[in-house]
Amino acid sequence: MIIDHDVIILGAGLAGLRAAVEISRRSGDGINIGIVSKVQLMRAHSVCAEGGTAAVLREEEGDNLDLHAWDTVKGSDFLADQDVVYRFVETSPIEILQLDHWGLPWSRRDDGRILQRPFGGHSYPRATMAADKTGFFEMQTLYDALTEHKNFTRYDEVFATSIVCEGGRFCGVTMIDMGTGELNVLRGKALLIATGGLGNLYGFTTYSQTVTGDGQAMAYRAGMSLEDSEFLQFHPTGLVPSGILMTEGCRGEGGYLRNKDGDRFMEKYAASKMEVAPRDIVSRAEMTEILEGRGFDGPKGLDYVHLDLTHLGADKINHRLPLIREVTMKFLGLDPIFEPIPVRPVAHYSMGGIEADINGKTKMEGVWAAGEVACTSLHGANRLGANSTAECLVWGGITGARIVKYLETDPGMHEVSADRVEEEERRIFHDLLENEGDENPYQLKTELRQVMDFHMGVFRTGDDMAAGLDKVRKLKERFRNIRIQDKGRIYNSNLINTLELENLLILAESMIVAALAREESRGGHSRRDFTVRDDEKWLKHTLITLTDDGPQLSYKDVTITKWKPVERKY
């Protein structure tokens, strides 16, 4: 079946919903939108964002746009494009106030103004918060705003499998309707990719199980470049052993990190910022403590340090961090009012993504990208906490507005060839589903995640990464010999999980190839064999493109408008 829409939005998290609202508002419901989600609409991983959304709201109290921009550029280890950073810091406060007008229940100060908390790497408390459930409330508010409009169709529990293009121009998307098992085609004049991250590459991760890099992989296969793939952020406080996020808000509210001797060890690594230093620095500090024997012995090799909130008191924890208390009590039987929380660095966020310009436009005509799936070069080598939800809102709005302008040029609908659809159907329902090999896709995924945990962690070396790349490529070969046990079509999660694994495998390869080439340490890419940042050779963005010969690397300059790179100290 072929279904036509003016705009197709892949992904229904913060970026996708924000774009849908913007397109609807600007067009007066005159643009027909199809919103594709692999889960029920409000189950996108964005609901898991906890700590806050960064924005300058207090200029009269000491904050300003230059300060937020500088914090972001410095936090990025000077790999962020500075024109993009300024666009971001100027727009984010507008988004906060817009959400306020739409009814988001922000936490409030005693004087009634919106409450903000300190966050890592920020020199002013600008993480705008709704307790520790910020993403959840942002999603609810955006969906509520979207329901005011009647110009969109939801495609829930639909798995997109490929982006169809012709002559460098977008034509449509193929997708499996899980409820019917049919392969359908959505044709569109424009596409927004807003599918989020790729965190399930790792075994110890904060991500929901659905976050498998599908949008990046589809774009990569369709000929778009991935930018800065080597920069994967490890959040300092993943709950042991589950990996569930213990928000940076815990430390923003005054929580301590302690080793097994009870020492607040961050004094050795970032004395001026302590626990609210940038995430790459805190994660390396924790791993150093663990590797040098000052951590606690944990299950399955997950040694840890303590996140101590006990001194904050019951009232503060219950009002500012209620979700953290609920989660630790539910999953560990531990009450953080009385006991410290076991944590260690956990795979959390992809700084890289689909190459996109300052407006979220990709190199393919008719295609934009927004949110974590995109790389507009905002975060560089290390993202500051609370800048990600803000990025989703900012570029959801920007890409929505740009798509409306694009459609005003009347670009027309392009045909999706029957041969292309038949090829995709054969690939999925014959080559994969009917394959009778002896490899279990779930075993391959387990091994892939172990490879990434071990070879592409907080600290890296060339030898380790090369060994990891070899293992990933062997897993790709073994993938050709898989067997999917469920041969049905309706709600075949076995098939969907296998398609997700296929996406993760090509993204793992691209990430390691990019990381091996970058012979320096910068932000989240910390090499034991190249321990210093090398601006002379590596002040540049990595681009990786899929060719018939495999991943091919190229580079482009970092945009520097105001601040030259300096030594990064906290």
Image (tube, rainbow, N blue to C red):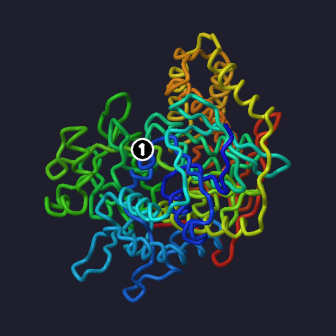
Q: Is residue 424 above or below residue 43?
A: above
Mark 1, residue position: 206
Q: Is residue 519 above or below residue 365?
A: above
| Quarter location, residue 98 | bottom left
Tell me the quarter of the image containing the C terminus.
bottom left
Badge 1 crowding class, 10 Å Cα cut-off, few under 14, some 14 to 19, many 20 or more, is: many
Q: Residue at x 53, y 32 (%)?
A: 178
Q: Position of residue 400 (x, y in %)?
A: 61, 65
Q: Nearer the viewer, residue 80 or 319?
A: 319
Q: Position of residue 374 (x, y in %)?
A: 62, 55
| Lateral position of residue 334 relative to residue 171, left or right | left
Amino acid found under the numbered disc labelled 1:
Thr
The residue most toward the right is 167
Q: Residue at x 46, y 50 (%)?
A: 284
Q: Is residue 266 above or below residue 504?
A: below
| Quarter location, residue 293 | top left
